[in-house]
Structure formats: structure tokens, C-alpha cells
Image (cartoon, rainbow, N blue to C red):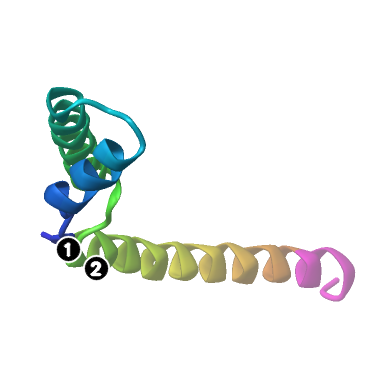
Amino acid sequence: MSTITFDTLAYAKKLKSVGFTEEQAEAQAEAQKEMLSEVLETTLATKSDIDRLDKQIVVLKWMMGVMLAGVVSLVMKAFFIP
């Protein structure tokens, strides 16, 4: 799993410098950290996700190739073979 660092202390200091109380700044920093953690856990693709999708794409390519061959053979039969 991917890890991204979020500096809650620096974030809280910035909030305090613009007028937030210490309690508000700390609560906001903690809420922001939790939100970022949740978003990253649910939206980032892992290596296994990408490998699984890659395998599915390979299968789809083969299926499209077989379907194209079938269509070409039907067209050849319909127009060129008596």
C-alpha cells in the first residue's frame, strides 16, 4: 500500500497563524489527516489491481481478434466463395 506523509503539526501551525485557536487547528489537522488517509486507501490502485486489469485486457484482445477473424470469414464466404 502506498503511504503519503501529511505533516499535521505544520498544518496546525499554519491554521493558528491565520486565526484558528489551538484546539480548532489540531481538530482540523486530525480531520484532514483522516480524510486523506481514507481517500488514499480507497482510490489508489495497487500493483495487484493493475496486474489483474492487464490480464483482463490481454483476454479482451484475444476475444476481439477471434471475433474479427469470424467476421472476416463470414464476409469472405458471403462475397467471394460461391
Considering the numbered disc 2 on the image, is that residue within a helix, a strand or a loop?
helix
Q: Is residue 79 above or below residue 29?
A: below
Instruction: Name the spot of residue 38 as percent of width and height, x first.
Output: 19, 37
Magenta residue check for 11: no
Where, by quadrant of the figure, is residue 16 drawn?
Answer: top left
Q: Which mark, residue 59? A: none
Q: Which residues are magenta?
A: 75-82
Main SS, magenta region, reads helix
Considering the numbered disc 1 on the image, is that residue within a helix, a strand or a loop?
helix
Given the image, on which type of amino acid does mark 1 rest?
Ser
Q: Is residue 62 left or right of residue 25?
A: right
Instruction: Residue at 15%, 47% (x, y): give it.
Output: 8
Instruction: Name the spot of residue 17 as percent of width and height, x first.
Output: 30, 42
Q: Is residue 61 left or right of residue 81?
A: left
Query: Considering depth in this image, is 44 or 15 the residue closer to the camera?
Result: 15
Is mark 2 in CB contact (under 8 Å) with mark 1? yes
Residue that carries the numbered disc 1 in the rendered image: 48
| Mark 2 → mark 1, Cα distance in angstroms | 5 Å
**Quadrant, the N terminus:** bottom left
Magenta residue check for 76: yes
Density class for disc 2 (Cα within 10 Å; few <14, some 14-19, many ≥20) is few
Q: Is residue 57 above or below residue 26?
A: below
Q: Which mark, residue 51? A: 2
Instruction: Name the spot of residue 44 as percent of width and height, x first.
Output: 27, 53
